[in-house]
Amino acid sequence: MKPPRPRGPVRPRRAAGAVVSLPRALSKLGFCSRTQAEALIAEGRVALDGRTVRDATVRVDPCRARITVDGKRVVAARKVYLMLNKPRGLVTTRDDPQERATVYDCLQGLDLPFVAPVGRLDKASEGLLLLTNDTRWAQRLLDPASGVEKTYHVQIDSVPDEAVLTRLTAGLVVDGERLSARSATVLRAGRRNAWLAIVLDEGRNRQIRRMLGALGIEVLRLVRVAIGGLLLGDLPKGAVRPLTAAEKAHLDRLWPAPSVRRAAGGGTGGQNRPGRPASQ
């Protein structure tokens, strides 16, 4: 019987990742947004394993594929986690067809990879906005199963009575959709208006404005001041800073264990993508 032939060293295989569209892969690698990636692909500037690709629906594993743009290899950027105090009047988008000012104007001059907002704040809203290039982490925070609480300070055009606060927490139907707040309290009140603290544990489109509007109340200002236990604090308006290690760890702990996610109907490991993030 012949002795077994000696083998050379076995090269470790790279772990497979999720198979996604080519624009999504460029976004996950932190190179650009999906919209920008689609434009680059259409212009013939993107190659996959040495071949130019003009089909944005091609699916790849960004952990294994060799993707180049203008002949340069795209590699995963360092993970970045930022807090921005969004000023009123900016839209939460990268490219605005109406050429309005965006939150990216606050990032000009900073040495950053491509980052995207975690959720949205509408143009008239302000306050705490997270940005990152870690798409998996962002999806976890946005997953409805996480139940991450978000706290808003809201100035309204009247002084509410207890019945109004009860309606907000008990819930009401607006445009066929049932909306409710986790809590609603009066921070301070004057003769004609008041500031409320409203906590949400879900994110429906313009949820606070719609609930108050259904009660005949106008929102004068809306400021997000906290996500979970992460506080906006005294960060100046329009300023941005990295999350501290402790702040990042705190947000990581808000993501429930797999057994809890399954019981709540959520995905495992972030595989089930949440719906489009809502704005307030």
Image (cartoon, rainbow, N blue to C red):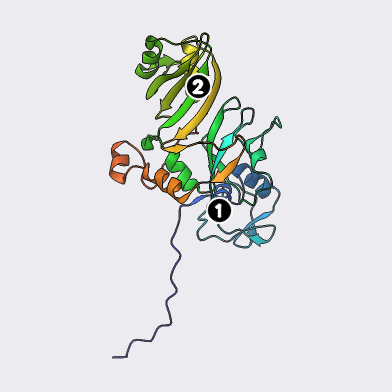
Q: Which corner quadrant holds the N terminus?
A: bottom left
Query: Image point 37% across, 17% down: which residue?
Result: 171
Q: Position of residue 26 (x, y in %)?
A: 58, 51
* Nearer to the camera, 61 or 256: 256
* Nearer to the camera, 136 or 91: 91
Q: The residue tagged with tag 1: helix, strand or loop?
A: loop
Discs 2, 1 touching: Cβ within 8 Å = no
The kind of residue on which mark 1 rests is Leu
Q: Could you classify mark 1 by the number of other residues whose Cα lies within 10 Å: few (under 14), some (14-19), or many (20 or more)?
A: many
Query: What number is the disc on residue 154?
Result: 2
Query: Image point 44% across, 11% down: which residue?
Result: 160
The kind of residue on which mark 2 rests is Val
Q: Position of residue 77 (x, y in %)?
A: 57, 56
Mark toward the start of the polypeptide (2 vs 1):
1
Q: Position of residue 81 (x, y in %)?
A: 52, 47
Query: What number is the disc on residue 29?
Result: 1
Query: Image point 46% across, 52% down: which residue?
Result: 18
* Nearer to the camera, 13 or 142: 142
